[in-house]
Amino acid sequence: MPITLDSHHDVAVLRIDHGKANTLDTDSCRELVLRLEEASQARAMVLTGTGRIFSAGVDLKRIHEGGAAYVSEFLPLLSDALLAVFGFPRPVVAALNGPAIAGGAVLAAACDHRVLGSGTIGVTELLVGVPFPLSALEILRCAYGTAPLPGLTYSGAVHRGEDALARGLVDELADEVLERALAVASRLGELPAEAFAHTKAQIRQPFHERIAEYRHTDDPVVERLWRSPAALAAVKSYVDKVLR
């Protein structure tokens, strides 16, 4: 099961448990949406990874193996999973137990609060040669603002510790990441549920509106670029050089 759901008192704990790097593929994206629905009655939620990695983002091996047809199936599911976290009405705290890279960094950005341990965080999609889906970019814009986006996305740099904190990529550092994330989630979960959900929806409304307005025209462009021979060749090169 690529996403597990446990509870700690009234706080749901969703744990990505998919392969060596807790990557996102069609199965884990579908499972994440289902587990979020199951956790809808929890006071708050913690999202974390298994082992020493939060999530390394998209499973590029599956992209390489499945080619263009798999890309067309996967990209809508990726956006659905990211938006399910982003739109969850109760508090969501990311316990970054290790690297949160590319799509993993976007998952972290979709949360309300991010606690980082010894790992790194960064969005590296352009280094692989593929653009961000609109949903991912708007989630990053909501979390970090428009001004930092070019530096964050164009460079593909990853940041750790005090550097990540100073840049606002995480909200705090902790040695015991899960323990601290549970404490924050428990505190946020004590806020009145309906008032919190409405306030969260107000804060995120402009981003949801932009996604709803432009996704139908932007998603086909992103899909075309991900399916292109150049992009698939770049993914193959990355898999061969880095993942093997």
Image: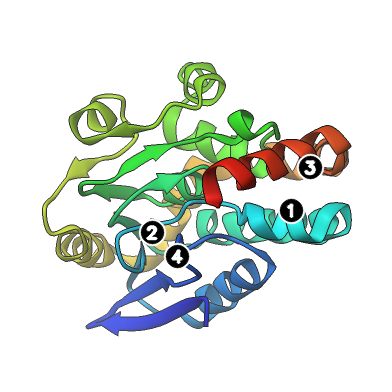
Relative horizontal placement of residue 182, taking residue 223 as reference (left or right): left
> Which residue, given by chain and number where applicable, does mark 1 sit on?
64
Residue 210's disc is none
Q: Which colour scheme is used?
A: rainbow
Percent x, y of residue 129 = 69, 31
Q: Describe the element under mark 4 as helix, strand or loop.
A: loop
Residue found at x 25% / y 40%? 171
Q: How far is disc 1 from disc 4 in space, using C-alphas?
A: 17 Å
Considering the numbered disc 2 on the image, is that residue within a helix, a strand or a loop? helix
Badge 3 vs badge 1, beta-carbon distance below 8 Å: yes
Q: Is residue 205 above or below residue 45?
A: above
Q: Which amino acid does label 2 sit on?
A: Ala
- Residue 198 location (% of width, % of height): 47, 55
Residue carrying label 4: 20
Q: Which of marks 2 and 4 is nearer the N terminus?
A: 4
Residue found 13% across the figure and 59% down from its top: 176
